[in-house]
Amino acid sequence: MKKIVMCFGTFDGLHPGHEDYFRQAKEYGDELVVIVARDITVMDVKGNLPANGEGHRLNVVSEHPLVDDARLGHPGDKYRVIEDVNPDFICLGYDQEAFTENLDAELARRGLSAAIVRLEPFFPDQYKSSLLRGMREEVDTSEEAEYEENGLPL
């Protein structure tokens, strides 16, 4: 019987850290199901919207060769998608905290028995979405200044 592995994230611009997350997760089973956070969930958890909308982020994750199935999370019951898939393993990122604190108790309450695994970081000082997003914003700001200096429209 094939083993199903599930992981979660925003995935706002895939980078090598995400790819390593997928690679590590895939080592636990045969099929990798990746849940992409809804825009509203990202807003609730991080306090701002992702740079890319949920549809775009879902499409990018769906196309990754290590991902067998990509789905959007549920906007209300964040754990319902786990019931839908019923994975054998749930792999969490090294710094993933949202909805994970009582995950084992929530799984038990729902009659699910997935093993929860915390994965290792992959060069977290280089490949962390919040850092990379800040770098993109700095580049965008400097590009705007350059346009303004040269009297060019944005």
Image (tube, helix red, strand yellow):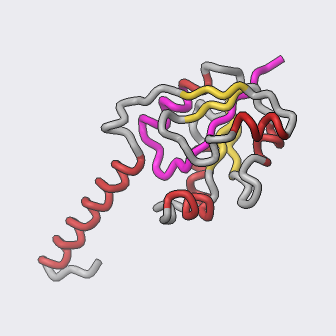
Say left or right for 118 vs 105: left
Q: Position of residue 3 (x, y in %)?
A: 76, 22
Q: Position of residue 119 (x, y in %)?
A: 53, 27
Question: Which residue shows up at 83% across the image and 42% down it?
Answer: 84
**Can you say whether 77 is above or below 142 in the image?**
above
Q: Position of residue 43 (x, y in %)?
A: 55, 64
Question: Which residue shows up at 16% across the image and 82% down it?
Answer: 151
Residue found at the very far right of the displayed protein: 111
Quadrant where the C terminus sits is bottom left
Comparing 37 with 47, the one in front is 47
Q: Image quarter for residue 23?
A: top right
Comparing 19 with 74, the one in front is 74
Say left or right for 82 vs 17: right
Residue found at the very far top of the displayed protein: 1
**Can you say whether 72 is above or below 68 in the image?**
below
Instruction: Tell me if residue 17 is in the magenta stretch.
Output: yes
**Can you say whether 19 is above or below 2 in the image?**
below
Question: Which residue shows up at 63% across the image and 58% down it?
Answer: 38
- Stretch of the chain drawn in magenta: 1-23
Say left or right for 27 vs 15: right
Instruction: Tell me if residue 103 is in the magenta stretch.
Output: no
Comparing 85 with 111, the one in front is 111
